[in-house]
Amino acid sequence: MSDKKPDQVVYNEEDEKYDAGLLPYATNASAPKITSDDLTGWKNTNIHKANHQIKTEYDKLKSAYDDLIQQYEYNKLIYNAEFSFEPIVGQTYHLYLKENNQSFLSIIHPDECAFKHKGSFKLNDDKIWERVDND
């Protein structure tokens, strides 16, 4: 019959030694009570910070997306407009609307034209139209 130790004695049978002091938890009744820390405040604070950071990143992405969509719409509008010349990169052109609701591109400044002005645009090196007025 083996030497069975009492329940309160911590004996490691594999290593054949007493290792109560090496364990990460209390092993006797007189040991201090194990309590978990209340992390509710820490969690709530960090959840708020993380959510704020994620929302900030989302707002930046949404703003960039909205700008990209607006740029797409401008380019679609201008490339679908009538013009009988090859636009020069860096030159400002003006988009107008005829009476039949057909848009056309012109070099004539809005002060010198009777058509409805839709906006002024510049062609960049990438052949993308950028709006240059604040309408």
Image (cartoon, rainbow, N blue to C red):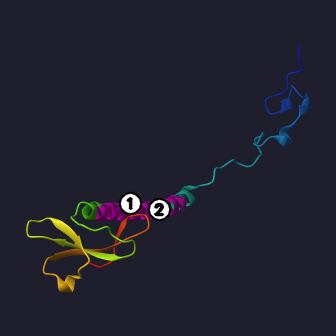
Q: Which mark is residue 65?
A: 1
- As rendered, which of 23 and 132 lies closer to the eye? 132
Residue at image x 86%, y 37%? 19
Residue at image x 39%, y 64%? 127
Residue 98: x %, y % from top left: 12, 70
- As rendered, which of 120 and 59 lies closer to the eye? 120
Whether residue 55 is in magenta: the answer is yes
Residue at image x 76%, y 43%? 26
> Up-down: is 70 above or below 92?
above
Task: Choose top left, top right, bottom left or bottom right for residue 134.
Answer: bottom left
Q: Element type at marker 2?
A: helix
Whether residue 63 is in magenta: the answer is yes
Question: Is 80 on the left or on the right of 36, as rendered?
Answer: left
Question: Is 39 on the left or on the right of 58, as rendered?
Answer: right
Query: Disc 2 designates what residue?
Result: 57
Residue at the far bottom in the pictured view? 111
Q: Which residues are magenta?
A: 46-75
- The residue type indicated by label 1 comes to Tyr
- As rendered, which of 75 and 54 lies closer to the eye? 75
Task: Choose top left, top right, bottom left or bottom right for residue 129.
Answer: bottom left
Spatial CA distance of label 2 from label 1 is: 12 Å
Residue at the far front in the pictured view? 85
Task: Choose top left, top right, bottom left or bottom right for residue 39.
Answer: bottom right
> CB under 8 Å between callouts 2 and 1?
no
